[in-house]
Amino acid sequence: MLFTSIKQYSDINSHMDIKKFIFIVEKILPDFVFNTGSLEENPFTFPEVQTLLDGIIVGGHRVSDEQQIYDLRSSWEYLFELVKKDDFQLNKETFNNINIKVAINEALVSGKFRDSQVRIGGTDYIPPKAEELDLSY
């Protein structure tokens, strides 16, 4: 089993005030969003991501690339809300809810585990079989 117990944020890092933690992460959110978008080959530059997240439209890009940036931000905002309410649990429901936020405009199905085998290009790594994913939680 991939995860054998449920951990709350306070179990993992109880010495840091949650408000302070969220404040710090929100300050570096554009960096997280940019790096995640880059992994998906999103063409936005870091300054463009910062500008877009500040509410200013950036020209010269596809709407789908812009939407991906917004969806990535949305997933982080959802995670922040869970942590603020001390309701974050590393479980299947949370994973699926974050997946809805990230993949809603990119995948045929979002918010649930995949039902077929996938490969990761450029590596020898083979992800778990689809039927094994439920056993991870």
Image (cartoon, helix red, strand yellow):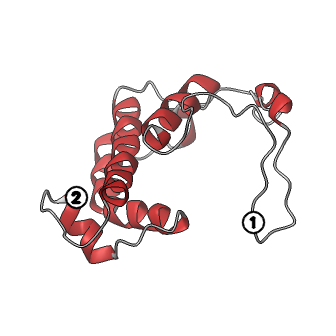
| Left or right placement of residue 1 versus residue 38 in this view | right
Q: Residue at x 37, y 46 (%)?
A: 71
User: Does 19 sit above or below residue 39?
Assistant: above
Q: Nearer the viewer, residue 121 or 76?
A: 121
Q: Residue at x 85, y 60 (%)?
A: 125
Question: Which numbered disc, 1 or 2, marks the residue closer to the eye?
Answer: 1
Q: Which residue is mark 2?
A: 53
The answer to whether the residues at label 1 and label 2 have Cβ atoms under 8 Å apart is: no
Give the residue type that dot 2 points to. Leu
User: Could you classify mark 1 by the number of other residues whose Cα lies within 10 Å: few (under 14), some (14-19), or many (20 or more)?
Assistant: few
Give the residue type that dot 1 points to. Gly
- Give the number of the disc on residue 14: none
Mark 1 → mark 2, Cα distance in angstroms? 30 Å
User: Does 39 sit above or below residue 134?
Assistant: below
Q: Earlier in the sequence, mark 1 or mark 2?
A: 2
Q: Which residue is mark 1?
A: 121
Q: Quadrant of residue 131?
A: top right
Q: Nearer the viewer, residue 31 or 47?
A: 47
Residue 135, given in percent of the width and then of the height, sits at 82, 26
Residue 17 seen from this side: no
